[in-house]
């Protein structure tokens, strides 16, 4: 299953190093990676990278996205501005599982200054390994879409 999934990645300087770790993990686990930058740890702004990742998912170029900044907050706000795209800022794997199972989040936001690499990869594995449950949650996602 994983070889058919493309994951778009985006980070600012605060998330650059963790993005590189996430990229390595994804490739080792046979995911396709679409790196939207940043491509260096030089200081930069997070909104354009969040937007790029969200647009990759919205257009179908990627099925999932991971965005990383210092806290994950700015990136999650940026991604959630794109219609139809749901980003979830997760600090543990329980949140990541429910972000998928209940919220059908397509984009995981991580805070590189909040979680270490080991925890981040654990969160990522939970996110990618959980399917949307549908049912009553589908109705709620429809309500979110209608509110846009
Ligand atoms: C950059 O210093 C920092 O503000 C950014 O990475 C992020 O945490 C914003 O939400």
Image (spheres, grey):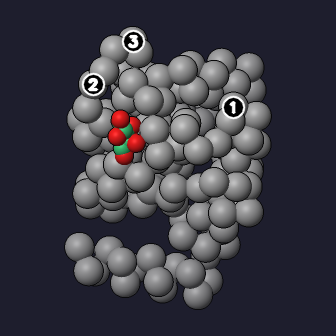
- Extreme residue toward the front, this view: 113
- Between the C-alphas of marks 2 and 3, the distance is 9 Å
- Between the C-alphas of marks 3 and 1, the distance is 18 Å
Whether disc 2's CB lies below 8 Å from ligand 1 is answered no
Whether disc 1's CB lies below 8 Å from ligand 1 is answered no
Name the quadrant containing residue 40. top left
10 Å neighbourhood of mark 2: few (<14), some, or many (≥20)?
Answer: some
- Between the C-alphas of marks 2 and 1, the distance is 21 Å
Tag 2–tag 3 contact (CB < 8 Å): no
Question: Ligand 1 shows up in which quadrant of the image?
Answer: top left
| Residue 146 visible in the current orientation | yes
**Residue under pointer 3:** 40
Classify 38 as above or below 92.
above
- Residue 74, horizontal then vertical, whole percent: 35, 48
**Residue under pointer 2:** 44
First-in-chain label (3 vs 1): 3
| Residue 39 visible in the current orientation | no
Instruction: Please name the residue shown 36% across and 77% down the image.
Output: 144
Classify 31 as above or below 147.
above
- Residue 22, horizontal then vertical, whole percent: 62, 27
**Residue under pointer 1:** 117
Query: As drawn, is 146 to the left or to the right of 108?
Result: left
Query: Which residue is nearer to you in this view: 62 or 12?
Result: 12
Name the quadrant containing residue 101. bottom right
Query: As drawn, is 136 to the left or to the right of 94?
Result: left
**Number of marks in the rendered image:** 3
Query: As drawn, is 60 to the left or to the right of 3?
Result: left
């Amino acid at each position: 299953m994983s070889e058919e999934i493309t994951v778009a990645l985006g980070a600012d300087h605060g998330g650059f190093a963790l993005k590189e770790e996430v990229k390595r993990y994804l490739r080792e686990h046979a995911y396709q990676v679409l790196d939207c930058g940043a491509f260096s740890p030089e200081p930069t702004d997070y909104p354009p990278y969040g937007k790029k990742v969200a647009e990759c998912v919205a257009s179908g170029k990627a099925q999932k996205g991971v965005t990383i900044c210092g806290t994950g907050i700015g990136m999650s706000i940026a991604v959630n501005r794109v219609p139809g795209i749901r980003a979830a800022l997760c600090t543990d794997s329980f949140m990541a599982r429910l972000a998928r199972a209940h919220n059908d989040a397509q984009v995981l936001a991580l805070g590189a200054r909040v979680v270490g690499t080991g925890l981040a990869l654990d969160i990522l594995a939970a996110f990618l390994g959980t399917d949307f449950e549908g049912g009553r949650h589908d109705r709620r996602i429809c309500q979110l879409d209608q509110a846009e």
